[in-house]
């Protein structure tokens, strides 16, 4: 029987991606806030992406951008737990219109 290791996290990028050119991966950091009553619980987690995301989505991995990550938990080299992503969705960025004072 196979064990299940699956995770879904929604949050905001707080540290932009760092590319490892040797193995074509990228690690970035996400914060996910959860409220229980008035108490705020904050989860900060590193996310590992593969070469497809490095090629197609690296320019979207900007600080402050909202993301939804589907993946699995993995132990990093130093023993910390990271998310190894299988799928990443980026929230849309809305451009604010400049207020036109000439009207």
Image: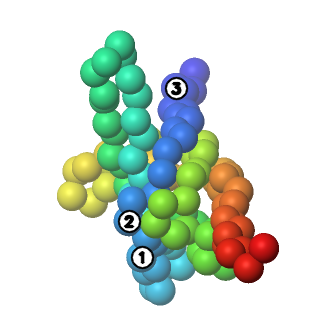
Q: With respect to residue 33, does 96 lie above or below?
A: below
- Residue 87 in the image: x percent, y percent? 66, 51
Crowding near pointer 2: few (<14 within 10 Å), some, many (20+)?
A: some
Judged left or right of residue 96, residue 48 is left
Q: Which disc, if any, is residue 83?
A: none
Judged left or right of residue 85, residue 81 is left
Crowding near pointer 1: few (<14 within 10 Å), some, many (20+)?
A: some
Assign a secondary structure to mark 2: strand
Residue positioned most to the right: 103
* Location of mark 2 (residue): 15
* Location of mark 3 (residue): 3
* Location of mark 1 (residue): 18
What residue is rendered at 52% in x and 26% in y?
Answer: 3
Assign a secondary structure to mark 1: strand
What residue is rendered at 48% in x and 60% in y?
Answer: 64
Asked whether residue 52 appears in the rendered view, the answer is no
Mark closer to the observer (2, 3):
2
Assign a secondary structure to mark 3: loop
Give the spatial CA distance, label 1 vs label 2: 9 Å
């Amino acid at each position: 029987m196979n064990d299940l290791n699956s995770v879904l996290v929604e949050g905001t990028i707080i540290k932009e991606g760092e590319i490892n050119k040797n193995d074509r991966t990228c690690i970035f950091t996400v914060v996910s806030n959860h409220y229980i009553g008035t108490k705020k619980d904050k989860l900060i987690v590193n996310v590992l992406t593969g070469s497809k995301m490095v090629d197609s989505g690296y320019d979207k991995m900007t600080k402050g951008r909202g993301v939804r990550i589907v993946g699995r938990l993995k132990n990093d080299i130093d023993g910390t737990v990271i998310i190894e992503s299988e799928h990443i969705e980026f929230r849309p960025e809305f451009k604010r219109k400049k207020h036109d004072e000439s009207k």
